[in-house]
Amino acid sequence: MEKRKIYVVDTTLRDGEQTAGVVFANREKIRIAKFLDELGVDQIEAGIPVMGGYEKEAIKEICSLGLKASIMGWNRPIIKDIEASLECGVDAVAISISTSDIHIKHKLKKSREWVIENMVKAVEFAKKHGLYVSANAEDASRSDMDFLIEYAKAVKEAGADRLRYCDTVGILEPFTTYENIKKLREAVDIEIEMHTHDDFGMATANALAGIKAGANYVGVTVLGLGERAGNAPLEEVVMALKHIYGIDLNFKTDMFVETAEYVSRASGRELPAWKAIVGSNMFAHESGIHADGALKNPRTYEAFQPEEVGLERQIVIGKHSGTASLRAKFLEYGIHLTQHQAEELLPRVRAAAVDLKRTLFDKELIYIYEDYFGYKHHHGKRD
């Protein structure tokens, strides 16, 4: 796997913006595109050109920025959609249609034959105009495998560059994902992109399982923004590939936190402290045993260095702290606590944390220190 080139397709500006209640202003879309390009994203799905208006303007402007990344527009298998994409100046198009029987019957109210016929026409039109084409199989994870293979063969013959395998309602788990992608790869010689949703909390795991089975493209969004429970998060997929699979995509990973914070503000969605990779708690140690280990050697309780994603290590003091943490924290203030002093102070620190139901601020720790040791000093004099 280490020798394979994996391509990252970011759809924050399309699927991410389809999150209920999220709207990016054009200047935000442009800033996000610049962030993604600088990070090292290979392809940016910039939006839906046929929507026209502000959407089309933003996509045009992104196309004019001269970014290294390929710029893709999202389309239905309709000629006017693809013409709108061409007008924006994109070099790639995603053309999307449902391949599951539940979608074909209840949403499209058409037949399997109609799906293939319309997709082939759209792909041929896009290829005739020199575009890179991703043929999307919406709801691929609930599609009949034989029909999906037939669909993949048809779009490949029409000229599609890759198939986007969409787990549209996030119902896959990694073992099934692996088997499905392996079967598809063996049946049809076409590149596959994983597009996974997080309804059962497995978007990243499913994306990785698909890559392991032979998919060379992976669709992601910053922070996992996306419809319902969201998509596979960019930062999780890139860091997991690097540290679990040994595939370094040469991303500027130290920009992850900065990018996540910007997208969080622009989307009006919080960046939780416990968020994998970029949450502020990733390198915050409170538990006495963990903090003691991290102080002795960070690798005891950290999978990678905080600087790698733009974070800092924090030893926080609270209910679960131990004397090692306390002594290390007071050293930051230039106060050398003895082991005995730390043992005396610790019950008071823990009691304060329980009363306040949180970790303690630096000033609060100093007050506890002054109150206790100041009192003891005076008490000794009175005796």
Image (tube, rainbow, N blue to C red):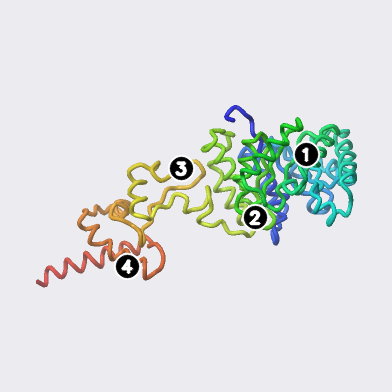
From the viewer's perspective, tell me whether residue 374 is left or right of residue 123. left
Find residue 357 and report its image quarter: bottom left
Q: Are marks 1 and 3 in contact (CB under 8 Å)?
A: no
Position in image of residue 270 (x %, y %): 58, 59
Query: Mark 3: which amino acid?
Result: Ala
Which of the two discs, 1 and 3, labels the residue nearer the N terminus? 1
Residue under pointer 3 = 303
Q: Amino acid at mark 1?
A: Ser
User: Label 2 to label 4, Cα distance in Å?
Assistant: 40 Å
Residue beneath disc 4: 351
Binning the other alpha carbons within 10 Å of mark 2 as few (below 14), some (14 to 19) or many (20 upward) gives some
Query: Element at badge 2?
Result: loop
Q: Which residue is mark 1?
A: 134
Looking at the image, is mark 1 or mark 2 earlier in the sequence?
Answer: 1
Q: Are marks 2 and 3 in contact (CB under 8 Å)?
A: no
Q: Amino acid at mark 2?
A: Asp
Question: In whole angstroms, how far apart are the C-alphas of marks 2 and 3?
Answer: 26 Å
Looking at the image, which residue is at 54% across and 57% down? 272
Q: Which residue is mark 2?
A: 199
Q: Is residue 96 above or below residue 358?
A: above
In primary-sequence order, the first of circles 2 and 3 is 2
Q: In this orientation, which residue lies closer to the viewer: 383 or 350? A: 350
Residue 136: percent from left, percent from top: 78, 43
Q: Which mark is residue 81?
A: none
Residue 195 screen position, x and y as percent: 69, 45
Q: Residue at x 82, y 54 (%)?
A: 53
Looking at the picture, how far across and down is residue 123, in whole percent? 85, 38
